[in-house]
Image (cartoon, rainbow, N blue to C red):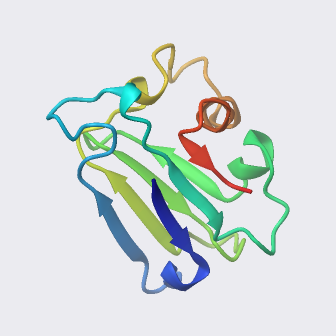
Amino acid sequence: MFVWSDQDQGTVLSVAKDRVADFNSSAGSYNSAEGDSLDLSGLFADMSVTDGVSAETVINVDDSSGYTVFKIKVDGVLLGNNLEIRLTDVAKTDLMASYDASSTSEADFLQHLIDNSLLQIS
């Protein structure tokens, strides 16, 4: 389990960046059976982030650069993110086999991560 707390955030002007090099891939390739999870509950303790829909307002997930990046607005500010968590060599399709950018909403993707214990937000 990889855990973040409210002390791990940066600011909109100075984004804190974290990298997870072995998320479910300690043997060299992605394997969901390893059971890794991103625990962001400490970031949202004072916010009403409880499901994929509410998580979508503070988490954006992008994998256009060859790895998955969680861009997080810890303080709920609409201007930009203040924490980025990069999962090296992990694509959205690794996290959700049926992921399709044209038909899977961000809320549905986040809910899938929550339902499958890949993401903890509360």
Is the residue 14 above or below the residue 110 in the image?
below
Residue 79 % position (x, y) = 63, 73
Depth check: 52 or 114 in front? Answer: 114
Q: Residue at position x 56%, y 51% from top?
A: 60
Residue 22 at x, y percent in the picture: 25, 47
**Left or right: 28 with respect to 117?**
left
Q: Residue at x 36, y 71 (%)?
A: 17
Q: x, y (%) of residue 21?
A: 23, 52
Q: Nearer the viewer, residue 14 or 7?
A: 7
Q: How many marks?
A: 0
Residue visible at 85% across and 61% down in the picture: 48
- The image quadrant that residue 29 belongs to is top left
Examine the rendered structure and indicate whether residue 66 appears above or below residue 9.
above
> Residue at coordinates 43% horizontally, 78% vertically from top-left?
15
Q: Residue 84 location in percent, x, y? A: 43, 64
- Placement of the C terminus among the 4 image quadrants: bottom right
Q: Quadrant of residue 89?
A: top left
Is 4 situated left or right of 48 in this image? left
Instruction: Give the residue furthest to the top.
Output: 98
Q: Depth check: 122 or 101 in front?
A: 122
Q: Where on the picture, by quarter, is residue 46? A: bottom right
